[in-house]
Amino acid sequence: MSTSTDLGVHGERIAVSYLTDRGFRVLDRNWRCREGELDIVARDGDALVFCEVKTRRGVGYGHPVEAVTRTKQRRLRTLAQRWLAAHDEHAPELRFDVVGVLVRPSRPALVTHLRAAFP
């Protein structure tokens, strides 16, 4: 992985595998609108899940999940509203999850999944 973009793409692949192995059904990846991008939109049972993925090579700047600030949370809520307006999906529960992927040399990545990470 030569760039941060490559690292992010790698982390998202790991996150998708992690989620699908746990029964999530991915509906959308890297959905974009003018306000930004949603990494993963998935179903977890009856819940519609908007999932932010953060990937890092180390914890020198904190754990990957710590990168989802209040500002980012507000943006994700707006993006979720835009996604819902553009798709015919309904769910009794909407949820925001965060998946942190810590890529380690010569070892498997560490995945941290925060379900309902913020309201």
Image (tube, rainbow, N blue to C red):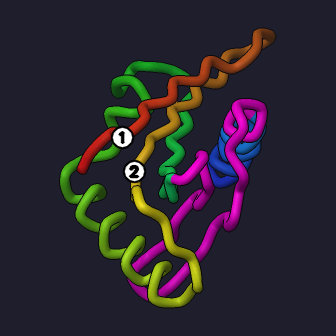
Residue at 40% x, 56% y: name it.
93
Q: Which residue matches tag 2?
A: 96
User: How far across and how far down the image is residue 30, in percent?
Assistant: 63, 67
Nearer to me, 83 or 94: 94
Residue at 50% x, 51% y: name it.
51
User: How far across and how far down the image is residue 82, in percent?
Assistant: 42, 83
Q: In the image, what residue type sits under mark 1?
A: Ala
Q: Main secondary structure of the magenta part?
A: strand
For the residue carrying disc 1, how many other residues have a C-alpha within 10 Å: few (<14), some (14-19), or many (20+)? some
Question: Which residues are the magenta region?
Answer: 18-46
Query: Taking 35 as reference, is 42 above or below it?
Result: above
Circle number at residue 42: none
The image quadrant that residue 115 belongs to is top left
Q: Which residue matches tag 1?
A: 116
Figure quadrant of the N terminus: top right
Label 2: element kind: strand
Q: In the image, what residue type sits under mark 2?
A: Phe
Label 1: element kind: strand
Query: Taking 6 as reference, is 82 above or below it?
Result: below
